[in-house]
Amino acid sequence: MSLTTVIGAQGFVGARVVARLAAEGADVFAPAKGDPALFERDLGQVIYCAGLTADYIQRPFDTVSAHVELVSRMARQARFERFVYLSSIRLYDSAGDDVGRETAPLSLAVDNPRSLYDLSKALGENLTLTQMGGRGTVARLANVYDAGPADPGFLSEWLARAATTRDIELDSSPAVTRDYVHADDVAEALIRMAKDGEGVINVASGQLVSNADLAACFEAGGWRIRFRRQDQLSPPPRIDIDRLRALGLAPRGVKDHVAAYLRELSNR
């Protein structure tokens, strides 16, 4: 198996990719931030997991550095065989379409501070697809989750809390709807894309699930769920995953996985 370099290996997704590759006996290079070896050695297949999410508004220049500047420098100076860039299905939110497809043009506002994340990711995508000599592919990730105590994200934190209490109050609304994809499915998809991916590929479950749907899973298992908010929100676009399926991948459904996890907790 050829060398794989994971940039951002200390993050949630990057660490999962490294663990998956190590379990398969792969040769993995996981450089620390600022490691000069990134531009001094062959990198093999690169999976670029570096980026900011929750704190991008407070750290706008770090966001641009991670999403764009390092990608630009790698396109010009690094030695690699393939390059997988992690982006987000959030890029579809402002398009106004019912379905998020990789071929659809994006609609991004330039005068909104919250657009910094989307705009920087879109520029990182463009560099990957146009400046990597045909060796780049883009993974647009849905909301990644797992149940570890330190795993980030709304659903991850919800699942972690379920291991310690059966009475959970959430600072959200039952109407909030998202596409969730498990971290293990993401790792498998990224490793596959490093070998066979082309263009932009949505890495998602293809299913929109509301907080109310998830609360029903918890309540069926014996948990009490309360929401602090009652906002009525329009759902985001459903994510098309035909390109992901064409790679032979079929991510698990979040409701079935949550129900199985809660049964496991109940049997401990």
Image (tube, rainbow, N blue to C red):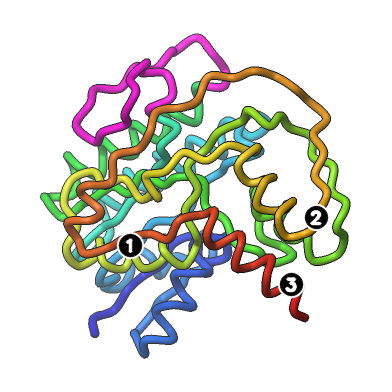
Q: Quadrant of residue 145?
A: bottom right
**Labels 1 and 3: the sequence-earlier one:** 1
Q: Quadrant of residue 24?
A: bottom left
Query: For the residues marked 2 and 3, what is the alpha-carbon distance in whole angstroms?
Result: 11 Å
Numbered circle sitting on residue 189: 1
User: For the view shown, which residue lies furthest in the top direction?
Assistant: 111
Q: At numbered mark 1, what does the secondary structure look like: helix, strand or loop?
A: helix
Percent x, y of residue 100: 32, 31
**Labels 2 and 3: the sequence-earlier one:** 2
Name the amino acid type tagged 3: Leu
Percent x, y of residue 171: 79, 34
User: For the view shown, which residue lies furthest in the front direction?
Assistant: 220
Name the amino acid type tagged 1: Ala
Q: In this view, does 197 lie above or below 214?
A: below
Magenta region, residue range? 92-114
Question: What residue is drawn where x is 38% and y is 65%?
Answer: 38
**Labels 2 and 1: the sequence-earlier one:** 1
Q: At numbered mark 3, what does the secondary structure look like: helix, strand or loop?
A: helix
Question: What residue is drawn where x is 16% and y is 55%?
Answer: 135
**Residue under numbered circle 3:** 265
Q: Is residue 98 above or below residue 258?
A: above
**Residue under numbered circle 2:** 223
Discs 1, 3 touching: Cβ within 8 Å: no
Question: What residue is drawn where x is 21% and y is 47%?
Answer: 242
Query: For the residues marked 2 and 1, what is the alpha-carbon distance in whole angstroms?
Result: 32 Å
Question: What residue is drawn where x is 42% and y is 18%?
Answer: 94
